[in-house]
Amino acid sequence: MTSAQPSDGRRRRYAVVGTGHRAQMYVDALLGSHADVGEIVALCDSNATRMDYYQRRHREAVPGGPDLPTYAPEQFDVMLDAERPDGVVVTSVDATHAEYVTRALARGLDVICEKPLTTDAAGCRAVADAAVASDGELVVTFNYRYSPRNSAVKQLILDGAIGDVTSVHFEWVLDTVHGADYFRRWHREKARSGGLLVHKASHHFDLVNWWLGDEPRQVSAMGALRFYGEEAARSRRVGPRPARSHGAPGLADDPFGLDIAADPRLRALYLDAEAEDGYLRDRDVFSEGITIEDNMAVLVGYASGALLTYSLNAHAPWEGYRVAINGTEGRLELAVVERAAVRTAAAVDPGVTPDRDGGSDVPRRPGAELLVQRHWEEARRVPITEGSGPHGGGDALLLDDLFRPGGAPDPLGRRAGWRDGVRSVLVGVAANESIATGQPVRTEALLTPVS
Ligand SMILES: NC(=O)c1ccc[n+]([C@@H]2O[C@H](COP(=O)([O-])OP(=O)(O)OC[C@H]3O[C@@H](n4cnc5c(N)ncnc54)[C@H](O)[C@@H]3O)[C@@H](O)[C@H]2O)c1
């Protein structure tokens, strides 16, 4: 089976596993823009209140229709037996992905899985084995590939604009709104998210793997928690602070506070749901219990001999990224500002859409610039047609590719499969191991079971 629409023209049936923030993009598409080609037939989550949120959206979109059946995680197989979906959309907590992916693939179902595909080496091995043995297709939703600016880089490399790639320098900065958000909830625990080198950087490692069409082989990394967390805050004399933002005095003036009571969506998805499972969405970013890093530096060697130097910082005053790619015939530089400055108190914006223009006299403004310079020539600017919406317009293009596959040609190979998902996670997992041991790590060693 593949994700193409069934030849009988019927709508494809999807079960959605994990009904938090990210599920909304898929649910809204299947209830709205893509309802002609797909439908949701069941929801699965450990939290009934969060499933209710989507049940209400379903009732609004399908008035008078039957409610969606809902299932707890331990009923996943019962759900597949009862509802007979064609595919499963996995948008649950990162560390749970591999379990659902492998169980769905074992039944020959198609799977649409959010990044990261998994969080550890065992998950990579399990997913790879299941994908090879299955008739189902696994698509990993690397929306950043679909951003016009990132697609433009791929096109330039394919066109030979800079010759053969020899090295990449890639810096990503998360600001004190978006970056801080990873330190409030489950992402702050490495066991649940793999840390930012897996949870976040799998996007970035995938971009480099895809741009270069190459295999990451050896990884060295260093990383530390320098800005968030109790210990770092103590050394900078931050605090004392309330354990969470909700109801805290001075919340409106706290740049690291998040008022989940003030936002109807956050209230419905998290505040109203927390009594059920104790999932607190607004924990203090300077509190104890954080096991991930906020400053990371990674060195990757590729099969072709190309090198990557990568860094990720999660407490910058602006958000965006800079990439420089060196080739045998020249150099390419991409500079992207997603948010030029954090000017207001906390707001959740995981997708980060460009903010309002700061005025003509400010030097940093939202936007993207792509330059190519061939040897012995002046640099030239490559025009980028940005899309609208989150991730530089990437999300909208991705949805079409997922739910209307084959509708448009894919000359850049943007549709990502299990190998891409595994490859991207392996870099982060290897980097985590290198941080822990101080040693370089070979990615193939992670795919070989110890015994
Ligand atoms: N591609 C992107 O740009 C992007 C953006 C945001 C999130 N994501 C991904 O989407 C996923 C969900 O992130 P989110 O922001 O929606 O988080 P979230 O916390 O809002 O939602 C996660 C959901 O998983 C549920 N859950 C926890 N354990 C479960 C289990 N064992 N079985 C089933 N459900 C379980 C939680 O109850 C919650 O409803 C993550 O993997 C994240 O990396 C991707």
Image: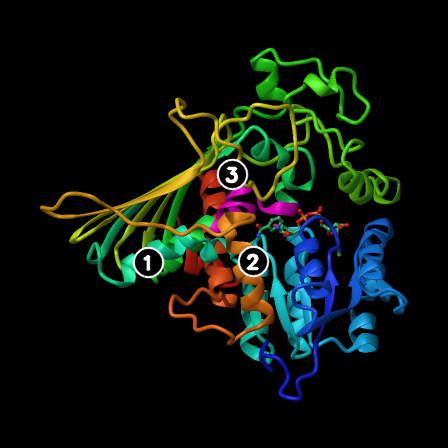
**Observer-nearest residue: 133 or 440?**
133
List x then y, in percent, for residue 255.
63, 22
Looking at the rendered image, the quarter that the C terminus falls into is: bottom right
| Secondary structure type for disc 1 | helix
Q: Earlier in the sequence, mark 1 or mark 3?
A: 1
Quarter occupied by residue 170: top left
| Residue underneath mark 1 | 212
Q: Quadrant of residue 187?
A: top right
Q: Position of residue 401 (x, y in %)?
A: 54, 67
Residue 358 in sight from this viewpoint: yes
Tag 3 residue: 354
Residue at (57% x, 54% y) in the render = 116
Query: Which residue lies at the image location 66% right of the left edge and 74% below the top edge?
Result: 37
The stretch in magenta equals 192-203
Which amino acid, by three-letter code, is at mark 2? Answer: Ala
Identify the element where label 3 is drawn.
Answer: loop
Which secondary structure lies at badge 2?
helix
Asked if residue 217 is positioned above or below residue 289 in the image, the reply reads below
238 to the left or right of 444: right
Q: Which residue is mark 2?
A: 396
Q: Nearer the viewer, mark 1 or mark 3?
A: 3
Q: CA distance from mark 1 to mark 3?
A: 27 Å
Q: Residue furthest bottom?
A: 8
Q: Most extreme residue toward the front, as rendered?
A: 360
Q: Residue at x 54, y 74 (%)?
A: 405
